[in-house]
Amino acid sequence: MNKQDFIIRKLNDLIELDYDAIEAYEEAIQRLQSTDYKSQLAAFCADHERHTLNLGLIVTALGGTPATGPDLMRVLTKGKVVLADLVGHDHTILLAMRANEAVTNKRYELALEVDGMDEGTRAQVRENLGDERRHRDWIDAQLEKHKTRKAA
């Protein structure tokens, strides 16, 4: 596999991961009670949809075919949310989404280490990673608020 094919594969891995995240966010939104949480997660879901598009354009420009759906991770990401819903609390759903965002953040961070990626592609991956970090930070803040309220 040449360097360009490797970069296309890594970008497609991220696209599949974003499709996984979209499914997990859609599941979470259906199960959450808090309208504020639903609204924020809908915005995060839109970020993931945008990521599939902006990375897909790069894959196409590199001569590849963009991924069009999730990979097998979807069972894990979506499953965490469904299982969390069995407990019946928004807090547990946010915990599941936090675990999913940890994976997404790590995979985007690793993608930035790929050699041979042009600066425009690297900038797009970095921008998408910024969104992922913002998602994780917001979820962390909500979980911390819950912890503080519970302790009071």
Image (cartoon, grey):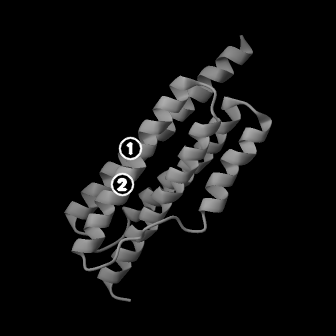
Residue 98's spot in the image, x, y percent?
59, 42
| Pointer 2 with pointer 1, Cβ within 8 A | yes
Q: Amino acid at mark 1?
A: Asp
Position of 147 with respect to 139 (left or right) is: right
> Which residue is label 1 attached to?
131
Secondary structure found at label 2: helix
Residue 26 in which image quadrant: top right
Image quadrant occupied by the C terminus: top right
Identify which residue, 60 or 114, lies in the foreground. 60
| Mark 1: secondary structure | helix
Q: Left or right of 64: which side holds 109?
A: right
x then y, percent, for residue 24: 57, 49
On residue 70, the disc is none
| Quarter placement of the N terminus | bottom left
How many numbered circles are shown?
A: 2
Q: Residue furthest bottom?
A: 1
